[in-house]
Amino acid sequence: MLRATYYLETHGCTLNSSDSELIAGILHGAGIDEVGSPGDADFIILNTCGVKTATEQKILHRIRQYARLDGRILVIAGCLPLILKDDLGALMRLAPGFGAMVGPRNYHELSGVIDALRGGTRNIVRIDGASLGAKERLEPRRPHGHVAILPIAEGCTGACTYCCTRFARGSLDCYNASHLVDKFSRYVVAGAREVFLTAEDCSAYLDPAEGVTLPGLVDRLLEKPGGYHLRIGMMNPGTLLRVHEHLVRAMRDPRVFAFAHVPVQSGSDRVLRAMNRTYSVADFTGMIDAFKAAIPGITIATDVICGFPGETDGDFQQTVDLLLRIRPDVVNISKYGHRPGTAASKLKQIDSGTVKARTRELTAAHERVTMRNNEEWVGWEGEAIIEEYNEKNGNWLARNRFYKPIIVGRGILGGTVRVEITGAAPHHLIGKVTC
């Protein structure tokens, strides 16, 4: 008898990628094998994201596409069903015969859902999960042994007026620190060279039972000996304010990637207040300056929204000026887009032509900054970990201690090589393996 098969497609953030590893673990445990094409699968699992309008539209197209495949059972997982829960009927109409919808805090129910689908039940909806207790006990199936994703929390403490992710992930809920230390130790023993700490907002992490914040958690993880590197995920400036001094000290350990992703969203205090962001531009720049002073060469990543309702030409210019001042290495630029249920969606919107023009201007400024930043790395030599292989281009992506992306010609996944930087591009460095 042929075993059942599944195709898993993931959209969105690192936390969603981690959830897909849990989904894969559950399906593998149920005796279902993964395949590389939806046309070859009995179950199509679509792990969705809805943080941006463009992403939502892409996923809605996928749902229509997969719903037309005869004999396949479509499971819509992830954030989008919760973001659209007030109009779930519209989502159902795209795929009338869908198998199931399963939310991020309901994956512990997925095994039972799969059994029901195998028995012929359809249109199952499980999106009302509350706590992380049951999810904490699930084991992932990791596609790459040298990289491990370690979720430390879900949800957030904020109420940003433009964001719909909180509708999907809920309020902040953190995993137990001792549980995280144990899981981290097992990953390292199993050969993980890179461990990504992830959450919607890593700096909001707090285990109230043990009194552990993010820097304390990092300190505890670093008690484990080994040749690994930690990467700390996105940190909201408002929550980072409370812990950044301790975190800077923890990140000076060479086993922590010198990388800080701190999304500023705007260089205008007026716009930040309208967004309900709980920090000022001065708060943000003060923390970035502290990171740079303590860890020279650190990679700074940030996010910016162009065209937030009410953003003036002056507000936008302040954002451009901020980027030129702090010179971030990575800037994720998004055009503002309406998201359902958010306060900002009720405000007067800026015309699309202005938003596009500002996005182009900010992108051009960012490219100039990153090119200048990367050119300063030419001639550097040191160790880097081989992270990915690009089959199309036949080259390898390596990361040095400063999490710089370095394209090299040879390597072994998870292996360490010595690299000399020979060239630069706006979004990566070019290196030569010297040994």
Image (spheres, helix red, strand yellow):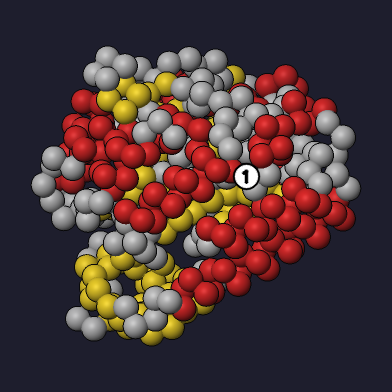
- Judging depth in this view, the residue of 355 and 9 nearest the camera is 355
Residue 87 image point, x, y percent: 75, 22
Residue 408 is at least partly visible in this image: yes
| Residue 1 position within the rendered picture, expressed as x and y whole percent measured from the top left | 37, 39
**Looking at the picture, how far across and down is residue 420, in whole percent?**
30, 81
| Foreground pick, 120 / 200 | 200
Q: Residue at x 34, y 61 (%)?
A: 296
Is the residue 100 above or below the residue 146 in the image? above
Q: Residue at x 73, y 64 (%)?
A: 361
Say which element carries label 1: loop
Above or below, comparing residue 171 to residue 296 in the picture: above
Depth check: give the residue in front, 200 or 289.
289
Q: Amino acid at mark 1?
A: Gln
Q: Where does the C terminus fall, quadrant-wise?
A: bottom left
The residue sitting at the left extreme is: 225
Residue 25 in view (yes/no): no
What residue would you read off at disc 1?
265
